[in-house]
Image: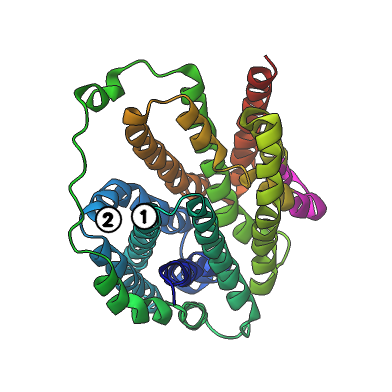
Amino acid sequence: MTAGTALGLMVFANTVSVGAFGPLLPEIARAQHLADWQLGLLAGSFGLARMIADVPTGLGAGRRLGVTLAAAPVVLVAGVLLLWSAGPFPVLVLGRVLVGIGHTLGMVGGLTAILLDHRGASSSMRLNVFEFAGMAGVLAGLAGVGALPADWGWPRALLITCAPLVITLALVPRFLREYPSQLAAPAAVPARAASASGDRVPPIVGLMFAVGVVMALAWSAISQFLIPIRGTREFGLDRAGVSQLLALAQVVDLAALLPVGWLADRVGRLLMLAVLSGCLGIGAWGVGLGGFALFVGGTVLLGIGMAGWMFPLGVIREHTEAARFAWRTGLYRVGVDAAAFAGPLVCGLIGEAHTGLFVSAIGAVALAAAVGLGRQALR
């Protein structure tokens, strides 16, 4: 087994837990007698954990890559077991936080391992395969939960669906053996780069930060709260139905990735991002305010819109000096993960009755961003 195959298996197995959680949210609410604000906090704590773990994990992966990769499944299993215990609300939140930290350890560690393996043009393909494996893991989690008998309780369904984590546990000895415990110390950061946060930020970079935050808000609020809760309470969907809807968005995202990338290379990232932001905005309106047909159509448009999630960072890179890019990337990741935490939390705090309006407001911001991006691209 090659190193790339091992990393792909790892991210696939680690990400199954991400897909498995969403369809179970309504059952968790009923079984654990949770209020909407508690559901929002429980769903959003995954993004909060990632936000907190982003920078420390990057530093850890740069120093002890093997340990970072090996720690990921251990932390993930601990989080899944805490959720499986169906304990009090704080225990469930802690479990969800550990799942977020474990997922970050695997993603950041895996990306670091790929980027350290310099093999010319093939590095881009390995990054795409790594990303595809993660998305396949989300789909596997959704399919696994949807295929299990409906009378199985949510803890049992979650535990069985997350069984692929044993794959990553089996790879722990290989990660510890193959990757050095201490990598070369990073080069010193120039003083100018260290003070980059105080330098003037180009307007286009600020716009890309805003677009990334809007995309993360929309994705987290819709997929982690609105689709499971509205689909169950208003449209009468069961666990399998919610899984199919969430999988639909994921499949559309996967199908759109390559065509969208091909078009962006020809018409420009900004113009393509304007189109995708428009799809995201209209999709948010459909999911938030529409009847069942628009609810499903909005889910499809959400998948199309999310196919452009990597474009803002690409535009930031085009307008950022090499010495400052790492700093701005770190800020971007923290901002996006903070939005991923805030989306379901706000939905839970305002309650299901007002969540549709909140998501529609996000859609309006996305449409405004689409207009601004279109003007920038056509200048």
Of helix, strand and loop, which one carries label 1?
helix
Residue 194 image label: none
**Vertical position of residue 296 compared to residue 149: above or below:** above
Residue that label 1 marks: 108
Which residue is outermost to the front?
Answer: 120
Kind of residue at disc 1: Val
Q: Is residue 136 magenta?
A: no
Q: Residue 62's spot in the image, x, y percent?
A: 25, 52
**Vertical position of residue 26 compared to residue 123: above or below:** below
- Number of marks: 2
Of helix, strand and loop, which one carries label 2?
helix
Residue 61 image label: 2
Q: Is residue 290 magenta?
A: yes
Near mark 1 (Cα within 10 A), the count class, few <14, some 14-19 or many ≥20, is many
Q: Residue 246, located in which quarter of the rendered image?
A: bottom right
Which residue does the image show at 34% across and 58% down from the upper left? 109
Q: Residue 108's spot in the image, x, y percent?
A: 36, 55
Which residue does the image show at 66% across and 53% down from the upper left? 253
Kind of residue at disc 2: Ala
Q: Are marks 1 and 2 in contact (CB under 8 Å)?
A: yes
Magenta residues span 283-297
